[in-house]
């Protein structure tokens, strides 16, 4: 006997990573590899880096540069390119409903090439796709026009031959190659990843990469640079300058170590190109589409079978079933959705907003969480002088005066804080510089001392006009200036700076640092023996005057915009690369409840499930990198939220792409604008709130059409089923069903111009396929009750009870069906009492009247015989009015019950 060994059940392999997870992993791996490579270059001596690159401090020869350009390719990063127009056109038609309509039109053409229904369906499909294509194509072209580089060239050292002397030349940025020696000065964009080999007073703005609002000081480098090994993050390395950053002050020379896709920036950009993840809109449309298609696949075969079995004419039954399929399908849905979205995009364009992807309009309305970067979005991305304080933390204009004199008289390149002091004085007109002061000498800023001094001649001393006095004014880092002070100003008096007072002054500065402010100290010294020149040794025995505190201020409209978002049910979370103190300060200033700030390291320390909980209860995330930003967005989406992201930097691109709706500004870096769905041409954040309202209006009108049409069509088909089972002839000809459907659908073209009730706009709105199905099943059969009532009236009252009188029966039901279908629009479009508490917009009212008049006119028109109609008697119309009034009354009663039972309507 053969023994059969039972097989051990094998565990199913876990599903592989999704496409979005693979992209996130690619981004993380790419940035990690680029970061490790750059950190290694930072740690090695400059001469060794040059040797490894086959370069010298004099740069490359022209011939060698050409060879390297051929080998490495142009210095450009991967970018999202708009598809060809014909690809965009094809995508505009790739929609489940459009495919169903094309299929139905094909069947109708196969049955009868002259069938007018083929033309009707073809027009619906054509207009819908063209409308969507044109709006997205035009928006795409507008977005392309925004891509203007600040500069397109950079200065490199090139040699005419191997032995020739190096000369600086300007070349296009895309021709920079590894080994090129680049010269940087204030205002330059860093063209590639550079290992600095010489730098002096170099300040670099890294906000686009790190989100840090203030420029970062790079280490002064000289010939014997032995490298740095104190960080593994290339953004923080003092001897690296990365592509995408810009020089705010100072000078430097660096050798190019990576170009294009090999740069730190390029490692992020490469993983962001390709197919975008599915958004809330895409998922919602797909679910609703397949819900309605399932209804059609169930109902149509039943109608076909009942008609074939009861009438015996299977060809006629097939034609009627196809007409029912068309009637059951909301064939205008693609067109209504496209018109809704296009109208929203046009309305946004008037507010100077470019909508690159039409679906983003609805996603904006469904958004219930807005994640935003801080620098450049919530803040103005500029440094301002926030306060000027004495050593005790009280406002003191004398501090402002000395700070202004220091900034005004220095002859070197003013940094952002110098300009902020001057701007503050110019705005307030609190300090006037006149002939009292003249310049004597200055001791320039350097990164070792972290301070700069000017020496001024105080000209006309009161009581002794012939005597002059030299005053040194020093401004710089608190620790360095405080260490040089022996006295301080206290309420106008010069007192000795004891240890207790020194500690108190340091605590005052630290207290303002903890508030997210950048603090500088201001000190003075009256020089006993005036002379023509001064040195660093004279910066001693200073008197501390007070402190200047700076910040990147919130935008004027930020607080109001965020309040508006909260009022609309949108929670705001700030995700920034800046430090936690600055982030908390700005968030508090714009009215956010900061709570506990979570750092990027804290995000890395938890798994996805824990991050979902952490993201739900956290308002501010700080010191986060691009991978961590995108991971927070995905965690919120996994928790069921529709997430928007507002950002303008390189470090925001991944999150912008992963969000349901990515929002950027016209001054953003190119990769951020390419990743965004919506671009604000003006930095007016209140436009966001208006966009949310527009999105909800768009969504509301779309859902309105779906629920009105789907429930009405379901009711009509249910009525057909009943009639087919009990009436010996077809209750309505196929051409009549198509005409009824066409007139109704044309009337619904006004839906995008309807208004929504204020209550509907107060909270986010989302697709709910289950709710739509429930609505169809509950509301649809109400029309069937009155359709059947009209059947009974036509059968018994008007004697339309045989095949000889079927045209009268069909004409009577056509009028009742079309009018009830049209009038119920006003019952369904609002949860209130129609015409009393809520009225439709005038386009909807006009189209309703035209549809009603068309329905009443057709049986009496010259087209009546060709469509199978006959005139109905005048005695029919009182019955019609009674049926319609009863229908509207019952619908209102059921609506009231439905809202109480399910707590929702649209």
Image: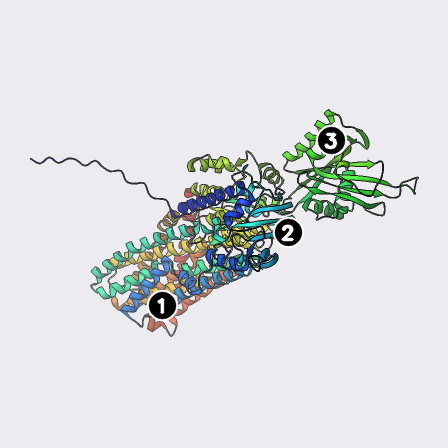
- Residue 626 pos. (x, y %): 50, 44
Residue behind mark 1: 872
The earlier-in-sequence mark between 2 and 3 is 2
Find residue 899 and report its image quarter. top left
Q: Nearer the viewer, mark 2 or mark 1?
A: 2
Q: Secondary structure at mark 2?
A: loop
Task: Give the numbered dot on residue 392.
Answer: 3
Give me the residue at 22% from left, 37% from top.
Answer: 9
The earlier-in-sequence mark between 2 and 1 is 2
Asked whether the beta carbons under mark 2 and mark 1 sit within 8 Å of each other, the answer is no
Q: Is residue 622 left or right of residue 396?
A: left
Between 769 and 29, the one lying in front of the other is: 29
The earlier-in-sequence mark between 1 and 3 is 3
Cα separation between marks 1 and 3 = 94 Å
The crowd level at tag 3 (other Cα within 10 Å; few <14, some 14-19, many 20+) is: some
- Residue 245 pos. (x, y %): 58, 49
Check the image and report above or below for 647 versus 617.
below
Between 521 and 12, the one lying in front of the other is: 521
Asked whether the beta carbons under mark 1 and mark 3 sit within 8 Å of each other, the answer is no
Q: Nearer the viewer, mark 1 or mark 3?
A: 3
- Residue 365 pos. (x, y %): 49, 50
Cα separation between marks 2 and 3 = 39 Å
Task: Give the numbered dot on residue 185.
Answer: 2
Work out whether residue 397 can be spotted.
no
The extreme left residue here reads: 1
Work out whether residue 454 can be spotted.
yes
Q: Secondary structure at mark 1?
A: loop
């Amino acid at each position: 006997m053969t023994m059969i060994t039972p097989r051990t059940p094998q565990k199913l392999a876990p599903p592989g990573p999704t496409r979005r997870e693979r992209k996130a992993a690619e981004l993380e791996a790419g940035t990690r590899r680029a970061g490790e490579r750059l950190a290694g270059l930072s740690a090695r001596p400059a001469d060794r880096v040059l040797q490894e690159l086959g370069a010298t401090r004099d740069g490359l020869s022209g011939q060698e540069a050409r060879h390297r350009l051929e080998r490495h390719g142009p210095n450009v990063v991967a970018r999202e390119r708009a598809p060809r127009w014909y690809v965009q056109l094809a995508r505009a038609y790739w929609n489940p409903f459009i495919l169903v309509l094309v299929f139905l039109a094909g069947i109708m053409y196969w049955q009868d090439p002259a069938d007018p229904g083929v033309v009707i369906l073809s027009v619906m499909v054509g207009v819908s796709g063209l409308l969507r294509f044109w709006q997205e194509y035009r928006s795409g072209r507008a977005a392309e026009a925004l891509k203007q580089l600040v500069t397109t060239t950079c200065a490199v050292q090139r040699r005419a031959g191997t032995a020739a002397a190096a000369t600086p030349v300007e070349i296009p940025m895309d021709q920079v190659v590894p080994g090129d020696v680049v010269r940087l000065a204030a205002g330059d964009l860093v063209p590639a990843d550079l290992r600095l080999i010489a730098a002096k007073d170099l300040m670099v703005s890294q906000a686009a990469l790190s989100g840090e609002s203030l420029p970062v000081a790079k280490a002064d480098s000289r010939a014997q640079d032995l490298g740095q090994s104190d960080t593994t993050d290339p953004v923080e390395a003092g001897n690296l300058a990365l592509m995408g950053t810009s020089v705010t002050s100072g000078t430097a020379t660096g050798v190019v170590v990576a170009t294009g896709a090999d740069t730190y920036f390029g490692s992020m950009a490469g993983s962001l190109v390709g197919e975008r993840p599915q958004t809330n809109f895409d998922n919602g449309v797909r679910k609703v589409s397949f819900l309605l298609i399932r209804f059609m696949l169930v109902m149509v075969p039943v109608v076909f079978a009942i008609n074939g079995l009861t009438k015996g004419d299977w060809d006629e039954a097939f034609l009627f079933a196809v007409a029912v399929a068309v009637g059951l399908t909301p064939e205008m849905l693609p067109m209504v959705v496209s018109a809704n979205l296009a109208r929203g995009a046009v309305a946004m364009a008037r507010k100077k907003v470019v909508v690159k992807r039409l679906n983003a309009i609805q996603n904006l309305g469904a958004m219930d969480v807005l994640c935003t970067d801080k620098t450049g979005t919530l803040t103005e991305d500029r440094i301002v002088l926030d306060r000027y304080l004495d050593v005790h933390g009280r406002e003191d204009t004398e501090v402002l005066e000395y700070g202004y004199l220091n900034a005004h008289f220095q002859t070197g390149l003013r940094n952002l804080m110098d300009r902020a002091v001057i701007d503050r004085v110019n705005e307030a007109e609190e300090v006037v510089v006149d002939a009292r002061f003249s310049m004597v000498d200055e001791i320039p800023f350097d990164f070792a001392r972290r301070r700069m001094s000017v020496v001024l001649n105080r000209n006309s001393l009161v009581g002794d006009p012939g005597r002059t006095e030299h005053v040194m004014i020093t401004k710089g880092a608190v620790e360095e200036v405080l260490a040089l002070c022996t006295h301080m100003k206290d309420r106008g008096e010069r007192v000795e700076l004891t240890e207790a007072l020194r500690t108190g002054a340091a605590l005052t500065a630290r207290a303002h640092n903890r508030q997210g402010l950048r603090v500088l100290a201001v000190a003075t010294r009256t020089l006993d023996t005036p002379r023509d020149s001064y040195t660093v040794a004279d910066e001693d025995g200073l008197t501390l005057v007070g402190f200047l505190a700076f910040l990147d201020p919130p935008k004027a409209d930020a607080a109001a915009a965020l309040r508006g978002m909260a009022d609309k049910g949108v929670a705001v979370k700030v995700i920034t690369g800046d430090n936690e103190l600055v982030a908390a300060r700005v968030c508090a200033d714009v009215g956010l409840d900061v709570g506990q700030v979570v750092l990027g390291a804290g995000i890395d320390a938890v798994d996805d499930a824990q991050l979902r909980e952490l993201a739900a209860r956290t308002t501010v995330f700080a010191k986060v990198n691009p991978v961590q930003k995108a991971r927070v967005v995905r965690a919120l989406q996994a928790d069921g939220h529709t997430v928007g992201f507002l950002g303008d930097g390189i470090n925001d691109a991944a999150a912008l792409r992963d969000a349901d709706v990515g929002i950027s500004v016209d001054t953003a870096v190119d990769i951020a604008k390419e990743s965004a769905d919506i671009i604000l041409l003006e930095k007016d954040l209140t436009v966001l709130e208006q966009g949310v309202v527009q999105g909800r209006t768009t969504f509301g009108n779309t859902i309105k059409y779906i629920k009105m049409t789907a429930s009405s069509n379901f009711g009509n088909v249910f009525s057909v089923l009943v009639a087919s089972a009990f009436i010996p002839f077809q209750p309505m000809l196929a051409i009549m069903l198509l005409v009824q459907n066409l007139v109704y659908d044309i009337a619904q073209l006004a839906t995008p111009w309807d208004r929504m009730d204020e209550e509907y706009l107060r909270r986010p709105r989302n697709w709910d396929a289950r709710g739509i199905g429930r609505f169809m099943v509950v509301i649809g059969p109400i029309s069937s009750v009155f359709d059947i009532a009209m059947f009974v009236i036509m059968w018994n009252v008007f004697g339309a009870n045989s095949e000889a009188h079927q045209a009268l029966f069909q004409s009577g039901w056509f009028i009742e069906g079309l009018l009830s279908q049209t009038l119920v629009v006003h019952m369904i479009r609002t949860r209130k009492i129609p015409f009393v508490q809520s009225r439709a917009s005038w386009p909807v009212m006009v189209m309703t009247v035209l549809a009603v008049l068309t329905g009443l006119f057709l049986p009496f028109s010259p087209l009546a015989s060709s469509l199978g109609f006959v005139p109905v008697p005048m005695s029919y119309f009182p019955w019609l009015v009674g049926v319609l009034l009863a229908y509207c009354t019952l619908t209102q009663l059921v609506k009231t019950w439905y809202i109480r039972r399910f707590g929702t309507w649209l």
